[in-house]
Image (cartoon, helix red, strand yellow):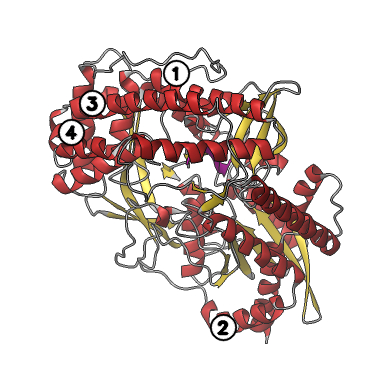
Amino acid sequence: MKKLFVILIIISGFVFAQNPGNVLNKDHKIDTAKVLLPDQGYERINQVITQLLSSYHYRKQNLNDSLSSVIFDEYIKNLDRNKLYFLEADVKSFEKFRFQFDDFLKTGKLDAAFEIFNLFKKRMNERMVYINKRLNEEFDYTADESVKLDREDVPWAKNNDELDESWRLRLKNDLLNLILSGKEYKAAADLLTKRYQNFHKIILQYEAEDVFSLYMNSFTQAYDPHTDYFSPLASDNFNISMKLSLEGIGATLRTDNDYTVVNTIIPGGPAFKSGLIKEEDKIVAVAQGEEGEFVDIIGWRLDDAIQLIRGKKGTLVRLQILKASDGINAAPSEIKIVRDEVKLEEQAAKSEILDIEEDGVSFKLGVIKLPSFYTDFEGQRSGKPDYKSTTKDVKEILKKFTDEKVDGVIVDLRNNGGGSLQEAIQLTGLFVKEGPVVQVKNSGNFVEVNRDPDPTILYDGPLAVLVNRFSASASEIFSAAIQDYGRGLILGDNTFGKGTVQNLIDLNRSIPISNKKLGQLKLTIAKFYRIDGGSTQHKGVVPDIQLPSIYSSHEFGESSEKSALPWDQIQPAQFNKFTDLQKFVPTLKSKHRDRVKNDPEYQMLMDDIEEFNENRDKKEFSLNEEVRKEERDLAEERKKKREEEKAKITGIKIEDKKEVSAQETKVSDYELKESGRILADMILAKVG
């Protein structure tokens, strides 16, 4: 996804230099004395970041009182998203700064940001006193009480009594989850005490750099979700992730309401190959090797969790995860992953043959599974004739498909987060004649048209592209071009909607007089546009035929981000359509609807989606042990029944869940099989 323009979906968050494995004991000290003050050098860095954003960010917006208010709210939210530390009076006392942050950022004045943080730390000290005291007393799990875990929309507590009550319910729920997972009450209380003490320790170890980073990112996020300030340590981690040489499980993570959540699975990595962990799963505990003790990471800062999960190649890490599909009330399951490097060759395009029978006619369809748009930049620069690239690998697959006389081709871009723009352009060129592929408009309103210069078409037969909510950036450029040219059908779920271009600025080059590392600024400088003039930003690529998905646009993808740049249009590029496939779409939709009415796999998928939505939409949870146990048992019973039904349909036995997860992707892939049927319908419609 970057320049030429390559942007990777990266780990977002703040980096802190802690030892995450050092869990505290009951002698944990409450530090009320240390007050953080801004270092003098941050004033200049602040001013430079402000100037860079004002001058070069794609979104030309004035740093004024209106934006100041947004930054103010973002900073408070980044500190206390669930309103569990600050009191209403605290927030009111901060209101004097609401319309001053713009002036502070211009002058580099950091006093207000540090004043707010220091009070946050004080309130956390007070909460730890309450937590330690309350966890020494038992809870009554026969009472008819409930807790609301998502507190973003609740008012701030008016006094300590109200805050104590919110924490009582929260602690009671946390303990109940541990008890329902099989822990005795005392062991659960000890684990929960360690969890909060460890989180408190992280805050106590904040240095001025950490507070400055938190404040700057509250500022950058007001511009758009992909603009970030990286402190020197965060910058080092970012550079590691860009090189894809990170030794670990091969996943990017984010935080969400105290949970470490899988954001993306990196193609070719250990998690990808295992099939045991998926996007949106929550990692709740980490253990090293076969015998290591599990360390609870709920409530941890993101980068502390990453340090624990990351490790040397060849070592085993055990994870306790809450499956996204199971809901927050489910029991965590344990998985094992052997850490490894993410190798370029393991991201390579793969192929298979899909045999479909439709209306009494047999079809042989070639499937190209493309996990990313990759290229060996160093090999290309050095002139290696055998360097790896997406386009070169797909060329070989298409030649093989021609020899095997396939009836059509499906390019599977599900979960493809992007990669090289140039590869997306060249890959499009295998399916269309020379012409524009994507337009790029920069912050100065200059539009560059990126073209496929090759007038030849390697494959001109029936084509479909399968996408989902996690198909992003370069995937969207390829899909949009195929759709605009009328070259193939786009099937699946609405894509992610990331249509922006970022540039990485080394702050040492902007402030050359400094003799220490200053970090980096990732800055949005341009937007991608389709050749029909519409942006892929925010809206993504809308499939010609939509397949069911559990992922809502309100919660996943670019459109779920409040500060995301909007969708808009520019002038279309000049291009000649390959053909008009839209005239077939109504008939194909009708046949698809008729077919799925009696498709048991489709009905199971719809049941899974319905249950996922119910779990996601549930806001309050009972704190009665019998009620919760009954809810969990019913959920487990439903899950087991669905697995048995799926086994009957697919022929896969559910004895070894590890083998099932690896096989299910290939054998019971409903989306791929239905895409094959739709492509077969199109072939028949064109012949007819």
Q: Is residue 133 above or below residue 449?
A: above
The residues bearing labels 4 and 3 have C-alpha atoms spaced at a distance of 15 Å
Which structural element holds mark 3?
helix
Please name the residue that numbered disc 4 is placed on: 105
Local secondary structure at mark 1: loop
| Secondary element at image label 2 | helix
* Picture coordinates of residue 362, whole percent (x, y): 80, 74
* Residue 91 in picture, x, y percent from top left: 25, 38
Task: Report the quarter where the C terminus lies.
Answer: bottom right
User: Could you give the CA–CA distance between mark 1 and mark 4, rounded to whole angstroms?
Assistant: 26 Å
* Residue on which the image places disc 3: 115
* Amino acid under disc 4: Leu
Q: Is residue 516 magenta?
A: no
Q: Nearest to the eye among marks 2 and 1: give it.
A: 1
- Return the residue at label 2: 586
In the image, is 112 to the left or to the right of 287?
left
Question: Quadrant of the rendered structure where residue 230 is?
Answer: top left
Q: Is residue 190 above or below residue 629?
A: above
Residue 258 included in the magenta stretch of the image: yes
Mark nearer the N terminus (4 vs 3): 4
